[in-house]
Image (cartoon, helix red, strand yellow):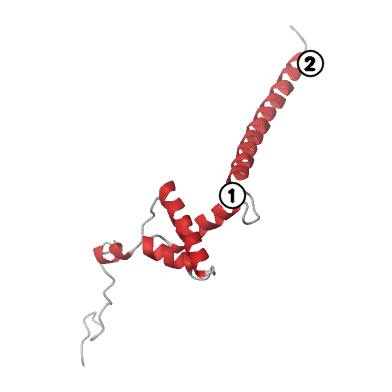
Amino acid sequence: MTEHRGTLGSLEAPDLGNEDGAMSEAAKSTKRTMRRYTDEEKAQAVRLVRQLRAELGTEHGTVFRVANQLGYGVESVRSWVRRADIDEGVTAGVTSDQAAKVKALEQENRELRRANAILKSASAFFAAELDRPQR
């Protein structure tokens, strides 16, 4: 009779990386990080995309080429060009100024509703105080 002392034969556990579950240094270096771009970098990218579109006579592939040349994210450059087109009236949409105004008005509306709720509860409290018999 063969004894199996808690082993599973030649089966081994797969290597899942570090024992503590942390990401290895090699895996960390391949992961992209969030980068903040200056307004000048954004404007340069938009200008280059528009210039390339004018030279080639097409929009196809221009954002990708400019993003790769500058080392920026393709979707970042695409969103900057879209936003610039809307802000300058080339494309229909809500401009950055209009969006900022709406955001400020929504914030003011929330503050006024909060103040109104406080005043309503205070007036109810004082009205109840006036209805009580005096001693």
Q: Is residue 43 above or below residue 117?
A: below
Q: Nearer the viewer, residue 131 or 33?
A: 33
Q: Label 1 is placed on what type of residue? A: Asp
Q: Label 2 is placed on what type of residue? A: Asp
Give the CA separation, mark 1 to mark 2.
58 Å
Residue 85: image location, x then y, percent: 57, 55
**Mark 2 Cα shell of 10 Å, populated few (<14), some (14-19), many (≥20):** few
Residue 77: image location, x then y, percent: 47, 59
Q: Residue at x 54, y 69 (%)?
A: 57
Q: Kindly indicate the quadrant of the structure image that contains residue 21.
A: bottom left
Residue 99: image location, x then y, percent: 61, 45
Q: Nearer the viewer, residue 74 or 60?
A: 60
Q: Is residue 9 above or below residue 59?
A: below
Q: Which mark is residue 131?
A: 2
Label 1: element kind:
helix
Question: Is disc 1 in contact with disc 2, using a CB cutoff of under 8 Å?
Answer: no
- Could you tell me which quadrant the N terminus lies in? bottom left
- Mark 1 or mark 2, whichever is nearer to me: 1
In this rendering, the count of numbered labels is: 2
Q: Is residue 58 above or below residue 123?
A: below
- Could you tell me which quadrant the C terminus lies in? top right
Q: Residue at x 61, y 48 (%)?
A: 95
Label 2: element kind:
helix
Q: Nearer the viewer, residue 103 or 74?
A: 74
Q: What residue is disc 1 on?
A: 87
In this view of the protein, can residue 19 be seen by the observer?
Answer: no
Residue 7: image location, x then y, percent: 23, 81
Q: Give the residue at the far top of this rendering.
A: 135
Q: On the picture, is 54 further left or further right than 14?
A: right
Q: On the picture, is 126 further left or further right than 21?
A: right
